[in-house]
Every structure is written in structure tokens, then in C-alpha cells.
Amino acid sequence: MTDINKWTIVMVGFSFALYIGIAIYTRVKTTKGFYVAGHGVPAIFNGMATGADWMSAASFISMAGLISFMGYTGSMYLIGWTGGYVLLALLLAPYLRKFGKFTVPDFVGDRYYSNAARLVAIICAIFISFTYVAGQMRGVGVVFSRFLEVDINLGVVIGMVLVFTYATLGGMKGITWTQVAQYVVLIIAYLVPAIVISLQMTGNPIPQLGFGSKILEGDNAGMFLLEAIDKIHVDLGFPEYTATFVGGKKSMIDVFAITMALMVGTAGLPHVIIRFYTVKSVHAARWSALWSIIFIGILYTTAPAIATFARVNMIQTLHGKPYANAPGWYKNWEKTGLIAWVDKNGDGLIQYGPGNPFKMMPGASKVVPTLQDKDARGTFGEPLLQNEPTDVGNELYVDADIMVLANPEIARLPAWVVALVAAGGLAAALSTAAGLLLVISSSISHDLMKKILKPGMSDAEELKWARVAAGGAVIVAGYFGINPPGFVAQVVAFAFGLAASSFFPIIILGIFSKRTTKEGAISGMITGISFTFLYIVYFKFIKPTSGPDEWLFGISPEGIGTIGMLLNFIVTLTVSQFTPEPPAKVKRQVETLRYPGHGKKKTIEI
Amino acid sequence: MSGHKTPHQLYWRANLIVLGILLSIWFLFSCVFSIFLVDRLNEYKLGGFPLGFWIAQQGTTVVFIILTATYVGIMSKLDRKYDVEENLQ
């Protein structure tokens, strides 16, 4: 057993024990406790919990890696995912808290005075949450398999058992306080390696500044880091790292559409929205939103720095070096299939450059290496692949997901830092999974059972349903984690587009326009989500080889949620004009959403 | 009635104005500076960063935090001014 294995067991074991301890301490007996933690979480802690809830395996593990490969274009994730928080804080959080119920379908059903609207919202919420949660469980499996060298599936099962324990025992209360702990774990895990690497490379301990500083040692010493990476990119045949919309990168309209879809989608994700139900007042909801964007901002301003450091480090340690002397981390990650090398010119050196090193396997949905026989080795001891090599000079395949996880090893940090990052990745994945599972559970027990199918149900009975539904959801999520149908894995990235095109417009209009009718909202939601879903399915699964020329306005499936959202707005507003006005009671209810309270002085209402 | 607004209506109008201003700044940074005008801004340097690139990868996030903080501050004041604060026991 290596040092990394030992440290990982210590760090992960300690953090898991902490989460379970919190769950036992915070177990609940009422539905109010289970769904919204009794509306009693202080703003700053709710901000941390929201941060952990929001920052998923994708934010922690994948985002910096994606930016690392995309350069400027990766900004769309940074702007999209933080910009959505501004919308959430200004347009949704205070009003939804004033509404004061438990779930998003609750709001939709009550505001649009209709169980049909409630049902459409339930389906959207469950659909969005399941596509998102499968990715989290997979993230848990990847971390386990690399750092503890267990099977990915066993990793998923361990994650399931853990989430099952604290989600069913403590509901939202248990989830909230474990998320607070998980935020602390994940932010430390993210910052420690970033600070150390920033110091090593630039002498500046603050990664956000180191990112714009000069390189201390090596071939490019004295150059600004970003100038050096631009030069390295050009030498290898890539477009410059900081280049914007040049060939080989996304177009301006596509970057805009994706950024917008991510922003609006963030504001429409049910597991994030419900976090604002858990504080005690409108005032606290606003503060909580501010705390969460601060806590999220800490990670999101560090990510692009990590991306640049990792890119420079990775290229410098691998490109042009003999495979036989590849560093230890390379050999470790090679086993997971997330990094691979094919020696095209037979020189035994690793050549890196643009383009895929080998072709997609027949029937696969993306280019991933597939090993030949387990022990088949090439001239230099490299595992041989079934994939057919391509004509380009590039010989190296690197999955974006390993950039954050391997970064400490690439920079030769001690084993405990590597283990800390593993614990952080797990914290990010588990906290988000728990939040999503709660949405699924409350959609079934509260929105479907209590509000539609069995209205007379007692609180105790509803709580029982909530626990059963949470348990069932964990099992389904785990199943998708172990057997990810290509479909689910691909759609995870699109959960935002779906949320943007379904919930966001009708919640906004529900608050800001009293004239919006149930017919408008239902037709808007259905139009938005169907258009977005069908566009994604068509261009991702039916015609996966399509390019910008065939896309609508040159917008990729990732960004189409922006158009879906606009369609939703247009349909909802138009249909509302031609259908009977909402009842007076609903209009009065909307009116009350707009004011935090009745004031402290006695004023005369006119 | 037209010229005579209730405190509630005045509060709501003030709220909409605040939202309009803050969201315009939000759009300016997230889309205009970071995407539409990024090439123009990249002609300037901020230390080791091309300016547009810095705004896209760092600056917007900082602006977003400032916007949210401003919102929280202004709304607390408006709540008091129009007397629509919550009465929490």
C-alpha cells in the first residue's frame, strides 16, 4: 500500500465519520425538519451549505480541467455558474423564501392554481435531478477507484450507503449540516494545492495573483505565466491559450449562448432553489445568497489559476519526454484509463499536440481509450489500445477530469495533499448528490403523494414516504452510477439547459407578472423543455457528427437552453394574454410575495 | 389613484429600479466585457493578464459578489424606509 492510499484512508475515513456523526446528531421527526430544516439555518451556514450543494463533482473535479484544455473559452463555466447566482440572489431567493413552502413544485402548483402545473413541475424536477445525480455518483466512483484502488462500482456503493444514511436520518437538516462540513473540507482541499503550486511556480502564495505573475524557473523563467502558456501552445500547434474566437475554438454566439444557458440554468436548478427555504426570513435569504456567492467565488476565482498551472506543468513534464521515464503519477492514472499514449513514430517519446491521438471506438459516444488484452504491452512497456490511431502528430490522450486530481502529484506535493484532494472531491460529489436526492424525495412524498394523490395523509405518514422515496432515489442513482447509460452521462451537462428552459421563466413571471396564467405557464414549461430536450437528443444522439453549420444560429446543444428559455418566455406571455386572468386570491398571494413583512412601525394601509 | 401610490407600490417600484440597474451591470460584465468586447479589451494589459481575459476569468466573479452585496445593502435600507420589514418573534 502506498503513502497516498494510507493518507486517503485516513482523510476520507475521518471526513465520513464526521458526516455520519452530524447525521445522527441532527436526525429529524417532522416533515418541516425533513424538507426545510425547520426554516432555522443561520444565513452564513446556509451560505456554506448552498456552496457545497451547488459545487458538484463537476465544479471540483472537472471544471479546472476543462478550462485547462479550453483556455479563454472555459470562462463560460466561470461566468455561467457564478452569474447564475446573481440571478438567484436578486430575482428568486427573497421571494421564494417569503412564499415559505417546501419545494419548487409547491410554488408552481400554488402560484398557477393547478395540479396539472404541479405535475409538470414534479416531472421536470425529477428529470433534472436524476440526470444530475448520476454524474455525482460516478464522480464518487472515480475518486475511490484511483485513490483507494477499489473497483469503481464498489466506490459507488460506498457513496450510496453514506448518502442513504444521512439523507434518510436527517433529511434537509442532516444534509445542511453535513454540507457545511463538506464545504470546509472541499475548499481547504481545493486551496492548499493551489497555494503551494502558485508558490512553486511564481513565488506568489495567492493563486489569483500568481496566475498573472512571472515564472520563476525553467526554460520560460522571467516570462509572465500567461505569455509562456500562449507560447507553449503556439509551439505545439494549438491556438493561444488566451485567444478568443479563433479557429479551433467556439464561436462568439455559441460562447454567449452557453454562458447564458448556464446562468439561467443555475437559477432554475431545484436543489439550489430549495436551499433558500431553509433560512428563517427574507432578510436571511438575501444574506445567505450573498454568503454563498462569496464562498463559491473563492473556488471559482482559484479554478482558472489551477487550470493554467496544471496546463503548463502537464505539458512540461510530459511533452518530448521518453515514455519509459514517465513520472509516477502518469503510471498511476494510466491504470484508470484516463490518460493514454500511442507511439505513432516509434521513437519512444511522448509527443503532444492538437487533435485526438486515436479514433472513437465503434458505438462509443466519445473518444476514450479502450485497452487491448490486459497484459498486452508495446515496445516501451505501454499498454496497447484497440483504438485505431489518427493521422495527427498528437500521441497523448488526457481526460480533463484528471487535471485537478492529478495536479498535486504532477507538482510533486506530499501524499497527504493528494489524499486531501480526494476527500475534497468526495465532499463535493456527495453534498450535491444529497441535495438532489432530497429534491427527488420531496417531489414524490410531498408534491405527488401529499398534494395530489393522498391529501389527508398525516405528517408522520408523509415523513415515512419521504424516507422511503429518498432511499429509493439513492438506489436508482447508484444504479445509474454503476451502469451509466451513455445517454445519462451525456445529458448531465445538459441539466442546465433543461432547468433554464423549464423553471426559470415561469418562476420569474410568477413573481413579477400577476397576469401570468396557469395555461401560459404549463404551455411555456412544456414548450421550453421539449424543444431543448429534442434539440439535444437530435444533435447529440441522432446526428452526433453535426457541426456549427447545421446548428440553429450556430448554437451547440450545450447552449440551446438559452433559446428554449426565450421560447418559454414568449409562449407563457402570449398564452397568458388569451386565457382568463388568474383568480383574485392568487393575485393577492403574488402581492404578498413582494414585501418581506408588515413593518415594525404601525402604518396605515391606503 | 394614478398620482397617489401606496408605500407598498413605491417600495416595489424602487425594488424594480434597483434590479434594473444591478442587472444591467451584471449583463455588462458577464456578456459585453467578457464576450462581445473581449478582443477589444485584450489590447490592454493588467499586469500579466490581457484585460479582457482577466475580466472573463476573474473580474466578473468579483463584480458579481459586489453586486450581490450592494443589493443586500440597498434592500435592507428600502425595507426600513418603506416599513416592510419582517416582524420576527
Image (cartoon, coloured by chain):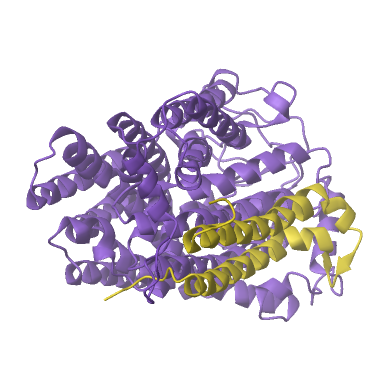
Q: Nearer the viewer, residue A110 or A467?
A: A110
Within the image, what quadrant is residue A163 found in? bottom left
Q: Position of residue A447 (x, y in %)?
A: 25, 41
Asked if residue A100 lies left or right of residue A202, the reply is left
Q: Position of residue A536 (x, y in %)?
A: 55, 27
Q: Nearer the viewer, residue A358 or A294?
A: A294
- Give the drawing colour for chain A: purple
Q: Nearer the viewer, residue A487 or A520?
A: A520
Picture residue at 17% right of the left edge, 65% below the top: A27
On screen, A564 above or below A277? above
Q: Nearer the viewer, residue A254 or A539?
A: A254
Chain drawn yellow, letter?
Answer: B
Within the image, what quadrant is residue A592 found in? bottom left
Q: Position of residue A99 (x, y in %)?
A: 35, 54
Q: Quadrant of the C terminus of chain A?
A: bottom left
On screen, A358 above or below B77? above
On screen, B75 above or below A436? below
On screen, A145 above or below A516? below
Q: Position of residue A244 (x, y in %)?
A: 81, 48
Within the image, what quadrant is residue A162 found in? bottom left
Asked if residue B32 lies left or right of residue A534, the reply is right
The number of discs equals 0
Picture residue at 45% right of the left edge, 40% below the top: A503
Q: Quadrant of the N terminus of chain A?
A: bottom left
